[in-house]
Amino acid sequence: MKNRLLERFLRYVAVDTRSDPASESCPSTPGQAHFLRMLAGELRELGAEDVTMDGFGYVTATLPTTKGCENDAVVAFLAHVDTSPDEPGADVRPQVIENYDGGDIRLGELTMRAADYPELALCKGHTLVTTDGRTLLGADDKAGVAVIVTAAEELLRNPSRRHGAVRVAFTPDEEIGRGVDRFDVAAFGADYGYTVDGGAEGELEYENFNAAVARIVVTGRNMHPGTAKGRMINALLVAHEFVAMLPPDERPETTEGREGFFHLTELRGDVGRAELEYILRDHCAERFEARKELLAQIAGRINERYGPQTVALTVKDQYLNMRPVVEKRPEVIARAQRAMRQAGVTPVIKPIRGGTDGARLSHMGLPCPNIFTGGANFHSRYEYCSLDTMARAVGTVLNIASETSDYQSIVGFPTEAR
């Protein structure tokens, strides 16, 4: 099974599926559409039923129930096919390192130093797949895609493994925040699901950031600097004031765990006009709203000083914390925990410092926590994936799909502060 998993993963990462935030199409890039057609064809060849690719690129399929399991819950597994536009994604040339020794890894002209990435120590003895330093790898989330398709192959070709109906979905454009914009949850027909889009072995995530994006437009007053006294409003300096009025210890580089942040992602402009873009993140709904309110207060103060049209602020919510939805269905988490333990994996429950399609799907009516793939250093040229961990993710998916118990032993939710 490992050989098939590796072959499949290497074949998948060879396709350039970077998403494009500037595109208005869905999928946003031709490479995604090509890859999604590939997956639909592969699922048909494996014997999946109801394989469809709709006009927006969503590929869905059914692994039919085995005899005696007709009344089981319909469980789904989902992954996104696009890769981040932050780094080059064409002509990916992966390296396969067998029996990794725990040391530094050469990536072409780059070196991934074990001292800088201590989590590499957990992969000693594993087979690793890395980049060659020129591109990202695409394990986010082609590792998840490969895990799901390999598990589907196992279920379809081994009818002795009893399971209820299983639904599979592959989606585009998750990396640019549009992954499930047009996904029809009701038509999909699952009771609950799991995104296979996590990182380290054992990760089981059902708590994520509440997220919003804020755009600040500063309109200045430009004129000749020789006659500017008392009249010029330098939009760049006003933008600097705006940034300085936010708490300096609430940034991504200064926070961890459940600590939220303001993250300045873009700053551009000139004396006459400047634009800033922030992403806001917080696990706590109340603190999340307080962050949005603070931006509004700062904009108000600046407008009081320079004039009412100086700063224009718009804030748009992106996704919400899935925990309030998922915790109403404790069997969903319990099933994943048991499946991991049966695969020899210790569940590691922790909040996501980010978001997944599962967060949005949960609020759309499909409770959908996230499970591990074995990938790491996503969105970078230092990205890698452990084949051994991927194989255990396949085992976890198979165990989730195959469980037909009535959930007599519910594992409780952690009670740490949110």
Image: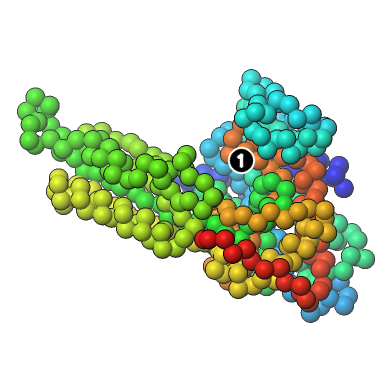
- How many discs mark residues in the rendered view? 1
Q: Is residue 245 above or below residue 418?
A: above
Left or right: 104, with 239 as reference point: right
Most extreme residue toward the right is 160
Residue 351 x/y as whole percent: 58, 55
To which quarter of the image does residue 63 belong?
A: bottom right
Residue 317 in view of the camera: yes
To which quarter of the image does residue 286 belong?
A: bottom left
Residue 80 x/y as whole percent: 63, 52
Left or right: 297, with 277 as reference point: left
Left or right: 48, with 378 as reference point: right
Residue 398 x/y as whole percent: 81, 60
Most extreme residue toward the top is 109
Residue 46 in view of the camera: no
Residue under the point 25% across and 35% down: 236
Q: Is residue 365 above or below residue 220?
A: below
Q: Amino acid at mark 1?
A: Phe
To which quarter of the image does residue 10 belong?
A: top right
Q: Is residue 226 above or below residue 50?
A: above
Residue under the point 48% across and 45% down: 255
Residue ID for mark 1: 378
Most extreme residue toward the front is 416
